[in-house]
Image (tube, helix red, strand yellow):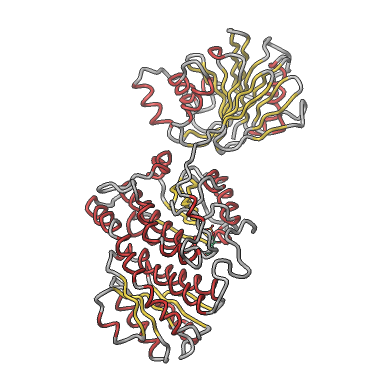
Amino acid sequence: MCGIIGYIGKKQAYPIIINGLKKLEYRGYDSYGICILNNDNVFLKKKVGRISNENGENLRDGNLGIGHSRWATTGGVCEKNAHPHEYNGFYVVHNGIVENYKELKEDLIKKGHKFNSDTDTEVIAHLISEEFKDNLEDAVRKALKKIIGSYGVAIVSPKDKDKIVIAKMSSPIIIGICKDGHIVASDPSAVIDFTKQIVTLDDGEIAVLKKDGYMILKEKKIEIIDWESDAVSKGEYEHFMLKEIMEEPNVIENATQGRLLEDNVKLGGLETSKERLEKTNKIYLVGCGTGYHAAKTGEYLMEEIAGIDAEAHMASEIRYRNVRLGPNYAAIFVSQSGETADNLACLKRMKEVGVLPLGVTNVIGSTQTRETEGGVYTRCGPEIAVASTKAFIGQLTVLTMISIFLGRQRNLSKERAKEIISELKELPRKGSLILDNHKQIQELAKKYSQFKNFWFIGRKFNYPIAMEGALKLKEISYVHAEGTPGGELKHGPLALIDENCPTIAICTKDSVYDKMISNIEEVKARNGKVIAIATEGDGKIKDIVDDVIYIPETLECLTPLLSTIPLHLFAYYFALSLNRDIDKPRNLAKSVTVE
Ligand code: AGP
């Protein structure tokens, strides 16, 4: 941890900076340094040892300067490694770590740059010099885009005088607002003697401090609403939920449009995180409700397709757990609204410990999209019904593509990637075939509408889908439903099975088909009725269960994108038969923005 400080104003900078460094000494005291600009003249002093040896006498006239107290991270304790670091007239003080400094330094040396220190920080001065044309903050912005890591930086230069440019990513930085100038510092202790008014920079913000004021620059991307106004009307549908289920095949189409290459995917929102994702050891997937079910499916997808360690968690749980996290982990927050309070609280906590925060989000410009460092939009258009349906399909589609992206950074072969991608292109058509069968599903919902309890079972990729089907049913019909892995039935749930408790079994032709057939037979042996979601052409299952809803065959890892659709429809028609308030079920809200 280091301390940075800077001053620009009407007063002499030197004593203010020395005073501030003494207050910041607790942050690091291996060495210290100070740089004062006075027109084109620069005074630079760097010393090993403690700032407390300085008596604060003004050694140098000038109203603009920066200072630093160092706790050595990269590069030993010596004068050349003390900050400020300079290159070509650009002076930098930095608190944080440039994780990719070695690669950057190699590239710069190839371009002829000479380095004076062993530190990571010095590359920042070189990068700024490379980018500088005539505007310091512009050069800083471009230079920092190349940095992977954390920073609280302050930069000055006689090449663009009368300003201090500061920037923040993960390391704290504040601006002290004084009546005769401005102080930038790592924390308020360095400004308290001059002001109690401070402004705190957020991650990704750059600020320019001048004698008469400051300006905070935050790159605001222009984002385009990717849906038409009729998207927020029911059209010819009785409920938004039915309309949104009927859009599910189209959602797969929209989510993949322009993102599928021959043997990889193109996800612009992950570009800036590419290098970090290459080094990521483990992916946490975090969500609530349906978002969690998508996250759980994502866990299986990432293990299977990307060959990376993955763990899905409910935000409301993991945010309170003592999970060992750090910069080698990434967290993908899965949320339709991008406003779910538990997700955002968890996101904040994970960012604080250096986890790479990414989002799979539907609502453009939502808080989650602003707080994450990248991500992928699901492009579903507005989802109005409280019960999330098409957004779930969009989340699964995007998580499948992210798995391909991560896999191709690792050991996923071109052939396997091609196979998944070409099948993904078939799913909108295959999903539409399921919707064409909605009458059968409506009849089944009616047939079972007198039951008050349901079990949903599935295995592997379809275990989260069993949970999703149960959530959909219970949240709009108010009947009890639970989703559980098929293998768990005999560990307890089977005690509930009888002629009054039907089971919906997702039993598609895949690696766990035979196991699911055994689970179905366990239920039948206790007089439980079974509705199977099965693969077209599976004649055997028809003779074992009470009712079958067939879905087209697809790759095992893509089954959730199809097996979900009949469950969403079943829940809708079941609630319709009970005359429920389907789009606005009791006790619930579309976006849970409170904890
Ligand atoms: C799902 O049908 C529910 N409405 C609810 O579980 C929802 O998925 C959850 O509140 C998360 O919302 P989000 O996707 O907007 O974060």
User: From where the camera sits, is residue 76 visible?
Assistant: yes
Give the camera-side residue of 386 and 342: 386
> Residue 20: image x %, image y %?
70, 25
Report the residue at 33% width, 52% height from top.
Answer: 404
Point out residue 130 in the picture as x, y percentages from the top left corner: 43, 20
Question: Residue extending furthest left?
Answer: 415
The answer to whether residue 95 is visible is no
* 595 shown above or below 92: below
- How many numbered marks are there? 0
144 or 559, nearer to the observer: 559
Instruction: Tell me where residue 55 sits by quadrant.
Output: top right
Residue drawn at (53%, 74%) of the image: 474
- In the current view of this chain or complex, which residue is farthest to the top? 40
401 lies left or right of 30: left
Residue at (49%, 89%) from the top-left corner? 500
Q: Residue furthest front?
A: 236
Q: Quadrant of residue 162?
A: top right
Considering only vertical position in the picture, is 458 above or below 58?
A: below
| 358 lies left or right of 16 | left
The spot of residue 153 in percent (x, y) is 57, 28
- Front residue of 504/182: it is 504
Q: In which quarter of the image is the C terminus?
A: bottom right
Residue 582 vs 133, above or below: the answer is: below
Q: From the viewer's side, name the closer residue of 516 and 35.
A: 516
Horizontal and vertical percent position of residue 430: 30, 64
Q: Quadrant of the N terminus?
A: top right
Identified at 51% across, 75% down, the residue is 575
Left or right for 100, reference 184? left
